[in-house]
Amino acid sequence: MIIGGSGNKTPTSLLTGKQGLHYGYQDVQLTSGAKMTQLAANTNLQTIIDVTGSGALCFCYLMSVGNNTGATIKITLDGVLVASETRANDSSGGIVNYGIMSVGGMLQGNATGGKTLSRDNVPFNVSLKIECQALNNPNAVYLAHDYYIAT
């Protein structure tokens, strides 16, 4: 099945520079229903998702639950790198409260509530690959993600 039915679509760049606000990875997981993957205990670029087929990426948020953490995310659709973003470890705490929101939207108004969430559907026709890297403090970095493969 080809999404759109008229042939392959050209992947376009996802909007970069979007931020979410979170106070804990459990809140994101419970609020969004997204799957949660903790980055492995090293600082190399890691492949988190690598699937073939057609479908859509619905939610993608890279975050940290530890201070002084930087991270990188790369999203490849149909063999084309469409998003590559790094947030450095800086005086604002890196991505500890304001993660990298690649697909969808999320805002947690305060530590006890006020959560809002939106999903998008970024289609892919052949493959989806998401790679992440924790620049330091890797045990504290998580990727919240949700996608589907059309059947």
Image (cartoon, grey):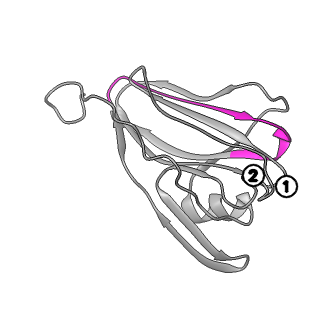
Task: Write the residue at 49% across / 25% down.
Answer: 51
The amino acid sitting under disc 2 is Gly
Q: In front: 2, or 17? A: 17
Q: Secondary structure at mark 2?
A: loop
**Residue 52: where, in percent of width, then height?**
43, 22
For residue 138: magenta? Answer: yes
Give the crowd class for mark 1: few <14, some 14-19, many >=20 residues within 10 Å: some
Give the crowd class for mark 2: few <14, some 14-19, many >=20 residues within 10 Å: many
Contact check, label 2 and label 1, Cβ < 8 Å: yes
Residue that label 2 marks: 94
On the rendered image, what quadrant is the C terminus found in? Answer: top left
First to last magenta residue range: 125-142
**Residue 77: where, in percent of width, then height?**
42, 28
**Residue 33: where, in percent of width, then height?**
56, 57
Residue located farthest toward the front when viewing the structure as drawn:
91
On the rendered image, what quadrant is the N terminus found in? Answer: top left
